[in-house]
Amino acid sequence: MKFGIVVFPGSNCDADCYHVMKHVAHQNVEYIWHKQDDIKDFDALILPGGFSYGDYLRTGAIASFSPIMPAVIDFARRGGPIIGICNGFQILLEAGLLPGAMLRNRSLTFICDTVNLRVNRTDTMFTNQYVQDQVLQVPIAHGEGNYYCDNETLKRLQDKQQILFTYCDADGRETAEVNPNGSVSNIAGIINERGNVMGMMPHPERCSEPILGSNDGLDIFLSIIEWRQGVGMR
């Protein structure tokens, strides 16, 4: 597969994602500068973490109007796989590719930590290499990761099983105490209704090799590859 990593001014996790896709997953990968408007040659896109445009206004707000975004939106509408990680998730929300919004962390402080995530579905292009209800250890690093949506949107996410990852304890239990940022229903990652666009606040690229203490995040990227090759469920 050919992965494209979209780089905005202020992105700082692009090199991490490149390393994982190129040297760990052994895929063809290229950077895509935010002013580029042609992404037809790519099979999947990654919007990495960072502080796009300095996080002025709301996080991801300016990036959602970047020259590349119409092509990203078209790519999504054509069914292309897209992952938005941390700031990338915020950009997908601002661009309307995923429902909801991000608020300041409940603590009003920047959080850098490792959290437990529960895998709620394994029949998607992003999670087919996991086991149902598997608990992952994944790093977080954000100041505005408090996912919010209204009750109607939350019910729709729940009814259509669009909540992929939730914050939990080591045994998979969702509690207020283990919710690091105040996200509604402990939400850490969601997909769109079609199932080809996924956003998550934790950083799977930072736990994709054993030398980093965990490779729990690698299977997110491998799931896309397996799905594309026809091994994952359709």
Image (cartoon, rainbow, N blue to C red):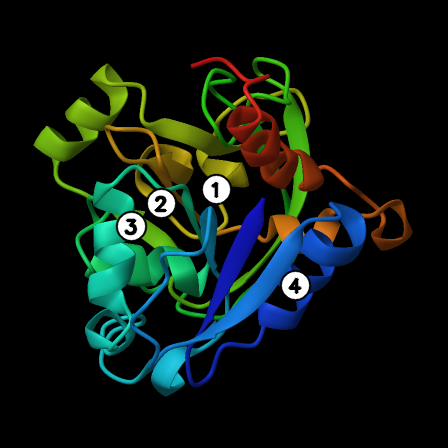
Q: Which residue is mark 2?
A: 183
Residue located farthest toward the left when viewing the structure as drawn: 152
Q: In the rendered structure, which disc, 4 or 2, sits on the residue that comes first in sequence?
A: 4
Which amino acid does the dot numbered 3 rest on? Phe
Q: Position of residue 51 (x, y in %)?
A: 44, 78
Quarter of the image with the N terminus is: top right
Q: Which mark is residue 18?
A: 4
Which amino acid does the dot numbered 2 rest on? Ser
Residue 71 in the image: above or below residue 122: below
Q: Which residue is mark 1?
A: 179
Residue drawn at (22%, 49%) of the image: 97
Residue 139 in the image: above or below residue 176: below
Q: Which residue is mark 3?
A: 75
Residue 159 in the image: above or below residue 175: above
Residue 190 in the image: above or below residue 69: above
Q: In the rendered structure, which disc, 3 or 1, sits on the residue that comes first in sequence?
A: 3
Which amino acid does the dot numbered 1 rest on? Asn
